[in-house]
Amino acid sequence: MAREYLKKASKTSRSDAASVTETVQGILADIESGGDGEALRYAEKFDGYSGPVLLSDEDKARAAATVSEQQKDDIKFAHDNIRKFAEHQKSATDDVQMEITPGLVAGQKLIPVNAAGCYVPGGRYSHVASAMMTVTTAKVAGVGHITACSPPQGAAGVPASIIYAADYCGADEILSMGGVQAVAALAYGLFGLPKADIIVGPGNQFVAEAKRMLFGYMGIDLIAGPTDSLILADASADAEIAAVDLVGQAEHGYNSPVWLVTDHRPLAEKVMARVPELIADLPEINRKNAEAAWRDYAEVIVCDDREEMSATSDDYAPEHLSVQAEDTEWWLSRLRCYGSLFLGEETTVAFGDKASGPNHVLPTSGSARYTGGLSVHKYMKVVTWQKATREGSKRVAEATARISRLEGMEAHARTADIRLAKYFPDETFDLGQSKEAAE
């Protein structure tokens, strides 16, 4: 397979990972032992915030009063789309039961977790959409208690638009705290909150590492790295749109990879020439992120044909995958590894990031090889149950006794023996030999 790199990344999404673990480990240990006080100390240290941690109804009302009607309408529109898509996802999986053999019935139940923590990033940008994506899906799943948390912007606290969105979408509590300290507060049940059964939502590398380290103590949606995006474009693609879309994703952060894969070299060259011009035209904070991401992490790859382009994309397993090429149905059927797919130039990653409906919390750093993104199902446990009549248990008990003894698990075998002896006292069964008797 011949892939020609017109631009090759000098760094990867894991380049800065090594230094993060030790810092996060120390913060988690301090908060686990010190509780609320330590969490508040770190909040003041990192966020410069010493105001109320759990927002009251009055706090929420004051925030809502500062959000414009147009902003509220946009949030409601996006929430409605996210809710409808989540409800449709939920309807695709249901409780089931079946009679496996006569008299033996088994089934599955979907049970939502009791408590979820939804992390809403702050910092450079106010991620209103993350509040909607995480809280709405938890609400549709039927989670008993939902806490949304977000980093305060200094003494000003959490942006009003985030507070309004989280409250509108159904958060039971809003925690004015971010970073590792917020993840710890959710996990350990600080400030009177229930311990989170699962913590979801995007965050910086410290948040992602805290979730990774606490995984097992509680559930998480996925282990996320910096956001990444790949565009597949053929000769029919609009070079200007492709370039704008690459820049649109590069502004996420200095370490957010963007990739262009094409079988048309002239298109690649046009895009490479145009991207720096588009970046130069951005506001300063956006420009700095996009410049670094394009310089250090971006790649442009020329392939021989669309089959090679598809294979390349699957190897990268991008978080966001845009197809700006002819015959979108072929691409839909062929592509296998991505977090979310955007078919045709009429849709763009930003639609999915903000308002179209499918969730924007997605697998990064190649993890789309084995998992999808956040959905109602992430908040739900698929558990199984079974029930048998005495006659229905007969054949299962015989097999269980013999398999248990084959494995050397005599106590297991005897749980089957006792039932056969009680239910069928007049029958004899070949239940195998214990390992001791066989020897």
Image (tube, grey):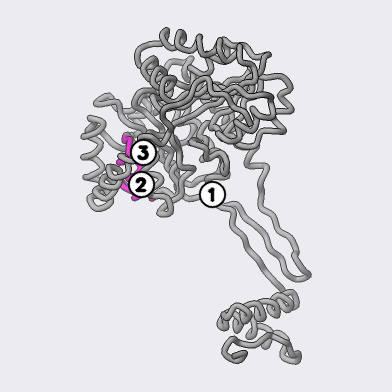
Report if residue 26 is visible in the image: yes
User: Which of the marked residues, 1 or 3, is nearer the chain's N terminus?
Assistant: 3
Q: Foreground residue, 173 or 418?
A: 418
Residue type, mark 1 in image: Pro
Residue type, mark 2 in image: Leu
Q: Residue at x 21, y 45 (%)?
A: 37
Tell me: 384 left or right of 392: left
Q: Secondary structure at mark 2?
A: loop
Q: Residue at x 59, y 23 (%)?
A: 261
Q: Position of residue 414 (x, y in %)?
A: 60, 84
Which quarter of the figure has residue 55? top left
Residue marked by disc 3: 17
Report the Cα–Cα distance between label 1 and label 3.
Answer: 33 Å
Farthest residue, direction front: 2
Residue marked by disc 2: 193
Quick check: is 180 in the magenta stretch? yes
Quick check: is 272 in the magenta stretch? no
Q: Are marks 1 and 3 in contact (CB under 8 Å)?
A: no
Q: Is residue 198 above or below residue 325?
A: below
Q: Which residues are magenta?
A: 177-195
Q: Position of residue 145 (x, y in %)?
A: 45, 45
- Dot 1: within a 10 Å radius of its alpha carbon, few (fewer than 14), some, or many (20 or more) residues? many
Residue type, mark 3 in image: Ala
Q: Secondary structure at mark 3?
A: loop
Report the Cα–Cα distance between label 3 and label 2.
Answer: 31 Å
Please state which of the two labelled residues, at mark 1 or mark 3, is closer to the viewer.
3
* Image quarter hosting the C terminus: bottom right
Q: Position of residue 298 (x, y in %)?
A: 47, 23
Q: Which label belongs to residue 332? A: none
Residue marked by disc 1: 112
